[in-house]
Image (cartoon, rainbow, N blue to C red):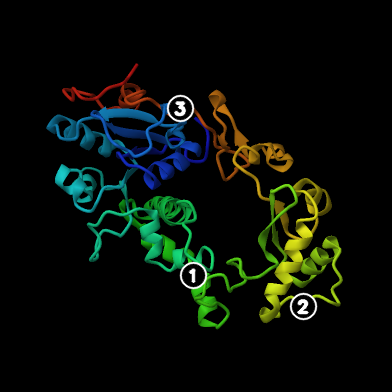
Amino acid sequence: MSGPLSGLKVIEMPAIGPVPFCGMLLADLGADVLRIDRTGEVDLGLPVEPKYELLGRGKRSLALDLKDAKAIGLMLDLMAQADVVLEGFRPGVMERLGLGPDVALQRNPKLVYGRMTGWGQQGPMAQAAGHDINYIALTGALHAIGTTDKPVPPLNLVGDFGGGSLYLAMGLLAALYERQQSGKGQVVDAAMVDGAASLMTMFFGMKGAGLWSDTRGANMLDGGAPWYDTYECADGGFVAIGSIEGKFYAELIEKLGLDPTILPKQHDRKRWPSLRAAFAATFRTKTRAEWCAIMEGSDICFAPVLGLDEAPKHPHMAARQSFVAPDGVTQPAPAPRFSRTPGAIRNQPPKRGEGGAAALRDWGVAAGEAKHAASGE
């Protein structure tokens, strides 16, 4: 194993979305992540072949029937050996299984118990079902993203992965650091509504200062400013510009071949529509490749808008090896990067139960009579 988290033992309870992504981040950085899978068929919404379930990469799988008392006993034995537990059930489910944090921390006082929910462990909506789009809707984030006509969900990046997985990962590592001083574990309560709200901190500050309008598409960073937007080119491709600073904006005007003396001033909001029209008409005169030749690498703050097939092939992304293709499946490489202890994708996503028996041996836990443990080996 390699990576700065090598030796860290992590249990990942059955879940979709933010919990598996958090587990993948830890596995990429060297943690030994044991994913607990159900033994029966489960509707995860997106059935795919195991090799394409990329959030499972680098992990091992143990299939258990969590309704079986023997399986629960095995889980408690695993928790006694683990450093971290990740779970994303609705509040109270782990307690009803007999695997809640009070029981787990009694068995292992050094355990860091990570809980991932959309609405949080408490509150009027804590038991309601939801998805990323619902959680970010409650925080102001969804309202701020989209066109003047309607809010547009930014994939599931803001709630599930940004406000969820990354805040959970940060919380786990903070608790592990604190454990070095206290010798004690604790519960990390990561709610997507909390994380997504936290991501909006700068915008609440800008609104308080009178620099941000609650009207979508009227602000500097939401597509309202002509010099921070995307434009269609002659071939139907798009480019993105972010020329906020004056010197960058001046270079944009120069590269576009426009006369600054007859254009509206950069920050004249009333005349932004005419400035946008000038930019749009100019960008439509050349193909995306031609604009790349003119602008890429300059200080305009420019980039082509690439599709998922194109992004891995871009010279910059290729030079940094930002994408890799183990087993022929193109995917983002582990991030961030470390000078001495680099992360790595140790194995492709496991089939259900694959590697479970080996994990039990490595963790020093006997399967005993837990007949529903399946190794797949």
Picture coordinates of residue 270, whole percent (x, y): 67, 81
Counting residues from the N terminus, which is met first, the one under dot 1 or under dot 3?
3
| Nearer the camera: disc 3 or disc 2 | 2
Asked whether the viewer can see residue 363, the reply is no
Counting residues from the N terminus, which is met first, the one under dot 3 or under dot 2?
3
x 72%, y 65%: residue: 243
Count of numbered circles on the image: 3
x 60%, y 32%: residue: 324
x 21%, y 46%: residue: 94
| Nearer the camera: disc 2 or disc 1 | 2
x 62%, y 71%: residue: 220
Cα distance in 3D space between marks 1 and 3: 38 Å
Residue at numbered disc 3: 51
**Position above or below: 230 against 176:** below
Q: Which amino acid does label 2 sit on?
A: Pro
**Number of residues whose C-alpha sits closer than 10 Å to that of mark 2, classed few (under 14), some (14–19) or many (20 or more):** some
Q: Element at badge 3?
A: helix
Q: Residue 264 carries which label?
A: 2
| Nearer the camera: disc 1 or disc 3 | 3
**Left or right of 230: which side holds 75?**
left
Q: Quadrant of the C terminus?
A: top left
Residue at numbered disc 1: 201
Picture coordinates of residue 143, whole percent (x, y): 45, 67
